[in-house]
Image (tube, rainbow, N blue to C red):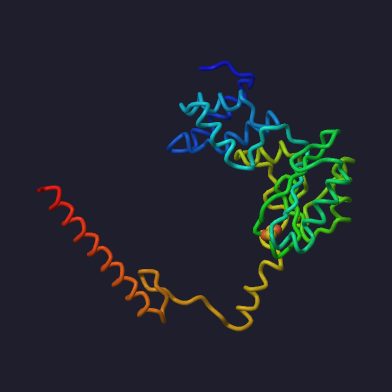
């Protein structure tokens, strides 16, 4: 076991996470979130602690930590502010918001303000395009933003005002959010709706018009498309038969 700067209570919680899974290594992702909640980033000590507990190499843990964008190798501020600049948000104003915030905060992408309060980054689609342009603060949604409301948001965060996600939950610090992602609830799970109105418009229209999903048979094929399903099965059978004959010919060659 390698020495680590993490205290005993953190090591105990890392082991607690690993013990939740039939295969302890399945706990690596939440374990890395716990490291971030304590260290403010994924540190070499955190990587080594995870590796020791899971009987992995530090290189293996590091490979995971550097693959996913939610894991940070540089210190993150109190609030991780993400601006979606993926296609729909970009054309709806995401690019303008990002440019305005870089200028207002005097930081570039993936940089933290001098007071350590805000880390700014551009993020990919959050599957919240119906609220574009969207921002995230510590993984909570801020919907239908504008450059002006974005500036107000970061100013409020830096001044320590209570800020609420447009979907309900109060914004906590990044480290607190990371602890939740490690699987230690903060009791706020019921703050805010589970789905907003724009996300449910399609469902409302379907109900209004009496639309329902097609029934499926036991194979999962929808009623009304049996011929297509049969064609697919027949075609797959033909491919398998062809594979078998190829294998037989190869086997014969080997046998010569
Ligand atoms: S493009 Fe921004 S949430 Fe989908």
- Residue shown at the point (75%, 63%) measured from the top left: 91
Q: Nearer the viewer, residue 60 or 184?
A: 60
- Compared with 55, 22 (above or below) is below
Q: Locate residue 233, reporting x and y percent.
A: 31, 70
Q: Position of residue 58 (x, y in %)?
A: 52, 26
Residue 4 in view of the camera: yes
Seen at 82% across and 33% down, the residue is: 116
Is the residue 142 above or below the residue 30 in the image?
below
User: Percent from the top left, x then y, of residue 21?
Assistant: 47, 38
Residue found 64% across the figure and 78% down from its top: 205
Does the image show residue 128? Answer: no
Foreground residue, 41 or 9?
41
Above/below status of 161 relative to 11: below
Decide if residue 216 is on the left or right side of residue 14.
Answer: left
Query: Across the whole image, how many numbered discs are drawn on residues?
Result: 0
At 46% from the left and 34% from the top, the residue drawn is: 24
The residue lying toward the viewer, choosing from 50 and 106, is: 106
Which quadrant of the view contains residue 4?
top right
Q: Residue furthest left?
A: 256
Compared across the picture, whether 98 is left or right of 232 comes to: right
Query: Which image quarter: residue 215?
Result: bottom left
Percent position of residue 152, x then y: 89, 51
Seen in the picture, residue 242 relative to 162 is either above or below; the reply is below
Which quadrant of the frame does ligand 1 lie within? bottom right
């Amino acid at each position: 076991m390698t020495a680590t700067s993490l205290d005993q209570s953190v090591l105990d919680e890392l082991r607690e996470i690993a013990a939740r899974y039939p295969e302890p290594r399945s706990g690596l992702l939440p374990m890395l979130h716990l490291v971030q909640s304590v260290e403010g980033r994924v540190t070499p000590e955190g990587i080594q602690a995870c590796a020791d507990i899971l009987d992995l190499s530090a290189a293996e843990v590091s490979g995971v930590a550097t693959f996913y964008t939610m894991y940070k190798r540089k210190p993150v501020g109190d609030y991780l502010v993400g601006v979606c600049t993926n296609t729909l948000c970009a054309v709806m104003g995401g690019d303008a918001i990002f440019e305005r915030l870089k200028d207002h905060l005097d930081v570039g992408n993936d940089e933290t303000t001098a007071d350590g309060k805000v880390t700014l980054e551009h993020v990919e689609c959050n599957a919240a395009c119906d609220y574009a342009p969207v921002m995230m603060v510590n993984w909570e949604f801020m919907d239908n933003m504008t450059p002006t409301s974005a500036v107000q948001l970061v100013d409020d965060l830096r001044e320590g005002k209570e800020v609420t996600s447009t979907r309900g939950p109060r914004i906590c610090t990044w480290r607190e959010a990371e602890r939740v992602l490690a699987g230690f609830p903060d009791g706020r799970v019921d703050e805010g709706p589970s789905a907003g109105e724009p996300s449910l418009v399609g469902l409302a229209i379907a109900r209004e018009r009496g639309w329902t999903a097609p029934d499926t048979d036991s194979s999962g094929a929808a009623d009304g498309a049996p011929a297509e399903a049969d064609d697919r099965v027949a075609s797959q059978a033909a491919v398998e038969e062809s594979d078998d004959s190829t294998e037989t010919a190869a086997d014969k060659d080997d046998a010569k």
